[in-house]
Amino acid sequence: MAILDIDFTSPDVEYFSDISDNNFFTLDENNLINALGRNNLNSLGNVSLLDIYLSREKVVEPHYHQNASELVYCITGSALVSFINPFTNELNEIKIEPGQVANVPQGWWHYEIAQEDDTHLLAVFDAPYPQVILGSDLLRLTPKDVLAHTYCLDEEQVSEALSPIQSSVIIGPSDDCANPAQLQRKQSPTYHQHPRHYPANPYHQGYANYPPHPQQTYTHPYNRYY
């Protein structure tokens, strides 16, 4: 139960909010996210939500929420909710249709892919201000020589491949993407798992000190909302 430091006898307590008035991100008129948190409705407990609209094959980019689990409810259309289970080291893919939900536990790497136009999803969080780490930010802010060295890759090819990512993506691909890859997940069953091999302990602690890199500016994408 959420314990709020709020005086419910005050005339300043809010019980109503129009989510459409609080846009979090817009790619275009058919692909956007509106949001609701305690800053918009101060009587909220430990809950918040994102109201998500997607066209076919648009993706809410891979990311994770370090302080909240996410329950994804399908209102219209259909979507593939995918996440990596760090305890089984498997990629799980769940197709949801109207009236169905998929649950993503706190801290799990995940993404959503719309399976048809006019897909409408509601993502509900058990935190008043969900935090997020976006895949696009990891890719663009991690020094390219570190990626190349760590994974035995060609640094020039890494830099060239990642150069289009200049800011947080949130919904992709953009309409000006010259050569979007073809998705291979169009006919997935309602629940299916694709095993992948990951380290046995994804939360390994105790890394050796690494030489410092020049500091890069990072603006948390939710700062525009909260």
Image: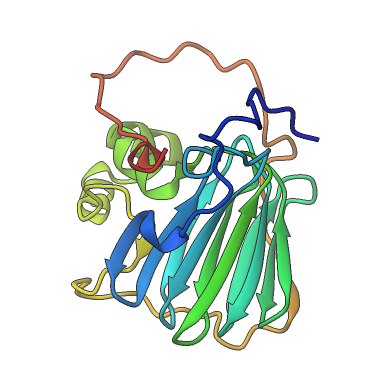
Q: Position of residue 224 (x, y in %)?
A: 33, 41
The image quarter containing residue 216 is: top left
Q: Position of residue 68 (x, y in %)?
A: 65, 41
> In terms of depth relative to the viewer, which is nearer, 55 or 129?
129
Give the residue displayed 44% in from the left and 46% down from the top.
134
Q: Position of residue 125 (x, y in %)?
A: 64, 48
Give the residue displayed 79% in from the left and 45% down from the top.
87
> In terms of depth relative to the viewer, which is nearer, 44 or 174?
44
Image quadrant where one finds the C terminus: top left
Give the residue displayed 51% in from the left and 49% down from the top.
63
The image quarter containing residue 204 is: top right
Give the residue displayed 74% in from the left and 75% down from the top.
192
Residue 195 shown left or right of residue 149 in the figure: right
Residue 18 shown left or right of residue 93 in the figure: left
Residue 180 shown left or right of residue 55 in the figure: left
> In terms of depth relative to the viewer, which is nearer, 50 or 183?
50
Above or below: residue 33 compared with residue 65: below
Q: How is the image coloured?
A: rainbow
Residue 51 shown left or right of residue 96 in the figure: left
Number of numbered tags placed on the structure image:
0
> In terms of depth relative to the viewer, which is nearer, 130 or 57?
130
Above or below: residue 126 compared with residue 28: above
Image quadrant where one finds the N terminus: top right
Q: Position of residue 121 (x, y in %)?
A: 56, 70
